[in-house]
Image (cartoon, rainbow, N blue to C red):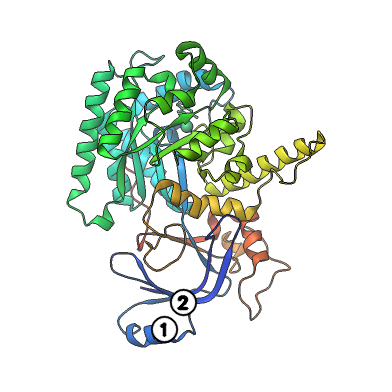
Amino acid sequence: MLYRGSFVHCPQLGQVDILNDHLLAVNEAGFIKHFEPSDSINSRRYLDTHLASQELIALEPGNFLLPTFCDLHLHAPQFLYQGNGLHLPLMKWLDEYAFKAEEELDSNPALAKKVYSGLANRLIEHGTGAVMLFGTIREETNLILAEVFLNAGLRGFIGKLSMDISTRPTYVENSAEESLVAIASFIGKLKAMTSQLPVHRRLVEPVVTPRFVPTCSNELLHGLGKYAREQCLRIQSHLAEAHDQVDWVRRERGAEDVEVFEKNNLLTPRTVQAHCTFLDSPSLCKIHDQQTTIAHCPLSNAYFSAEPFRLREALNIGVSVGLGTDVAGGYSIDIMNAMRQAVVVSRMREGARTMGNISSRVSLAIDWKEALYLATRGGAIGLGLPDGSGMFQVGAPFDAQHIELFKIEPARGIGSFDVFELELDGHGLSEDMVEKWWCLGDSRNRLATWVQGVKLAAIPVQE
Ligand code: GUN
Ligand code: FE
């Protein structure tokens, strides 16, 4: 498959490259095998040799391809009640909403399939190609989630929840031992599910998922850390998210979250920790030293954390950071919203700092270019996706979204904003246009989403 037109990507934090009139070729396995300006000698040769045998998609002027978004933190079963219950503090919300909804899916496979199919369709529509997911306790429900993601063609890191402590007596594993047997069984079954597929189609992978410290005994955390290390598995959890949760850990375990995770080998280069809102500089340095990634979830932080994440400080010391929607602690599945919220929150932090006359040369605010990096390349690195993911380069998988800016058809409601002053000239797409899309665009501007070279289509949502 050949694509010709404008490409936009962020190879580094703060850098947006707009590559007009380029030619990109994707091989059968979904990897980029050519990417150069269309008028280069190599591109002309490439076209001469392959045009007869391969389909060429020529993007309309003003349209562009962008790497798909990465969502580093999403609770799949909570999609059931997205947008409800956010008046409660975290620990109460978990008890009254989250555990209940998760238990409901665990007892109703048909409902699970319906909710997970709907979730996959919404992700495709919003340009998200790779997601790290929290599932539920029960194996079967998590295998349904994996199957739905495989069928949809999305990259999914599937986390069967490990929790041997709960406020809900009917939604808990009976012991650390039982929980450790269950995670090994789930991982075996998930691997068996993909083992017949070619390596590049194995788009789902298991993640060891201690829910968070308050739902895991020390014995369970220790066992999970050991198992993940032995099997070289990815890990995800919640770290230093909310006052009531942090207080609980101090009271019951006599330690900080971060110390508990570290002691149990759960901070690794293959770990994604959500929130990390209350981490001070030494703790952020610890995260950096362990090469652990942080999933920054600005919307749910605003509800549950009461304090913003120290994003600029984390970036300055080189911590790996990506964005998360935290559905349903966050009510929006759209990473575009997470990008905008990350910028808004950081600007408010900067505003508060300068009002207090605290001087520092470095602003705490991030800008749209930095947010776009976090949503694409930064997230891909955090998830450990194949080399070059989150940008366009030879050898990387072709994970892309097709964005349309100009072909607005008001009668059909297509096109989410008006472009009055920006006009395409002979120079192609400009930074102003991309910025405008970043601020005002939505899923109506998205014409297609590809993962590993395959164009994704909505899957049936069954009862
Ligand atoms: N901490 C433990 N479980 C959860 C959850 O489901 N959502 C959020 N936001 N935080 C948690
Ligand atoms: Fe969460």
Residue 334: x and y in percent read: 52, 46
Residue 443: x and y in percent read: 53, 54
Asked if 243 appears above or below 131 in the picture, the reply is above
User: Is residue 85 in view?
Assistant: yes
Instruction: Name the amino acid, label 1.
Output: Asn
Where the C terminus falls, by quadrant? top left
Name the secondary structure under disc 2. Answer: strand
The residue that disc 2 covers is 36
The residue that disc 1 covers is 42
Q: CA distance from mark 2 to mark 1?
A: 8 Å
Dot 2 and dot 1 residues touching (CB under 8 Å): yes
Residue 59: x and y in percent read: 49, 73
Identify the residue at horizontal 54%, vertical 31% (top origin): 283
* Number of callouts: 2
Residue count near mark 1 (Cα–Cα under 10 Å), binned few <14, some 14–19, many ≥20 = some
Residue 306's disc is none
Name the secondary structure under disc 1. Answer: helix
Label 2 beta carbon within 8 A of ligand 2? no
Asked if 19 appears above or below 172 in the picture, the reply is below
Residue count near mark 2 (Cα–Cα under 10 Å), binned few <14, some 14–19, many ≥20 = some
Residue 110: x and y in percent read: 29, 34
- Of 146 and 211, nearer the camera is 211
User: Is residue 463 in view?
Assistant: no
- Of 80 and 393, nearer the camera is 393
Instruction: Name the amino acid, label 2.
Output: Glu
Identify the residue at horizontal 58%, vertical 38% (top origin): 298
Looking at the image, tell me whether mark 2 or mark 1 is earlier in sequence order.
2
Asked if 98 appears above or below 359 in the picture, the reply is above
Identify the residue at horizontal 35%, vertical 73% (top origin): 1
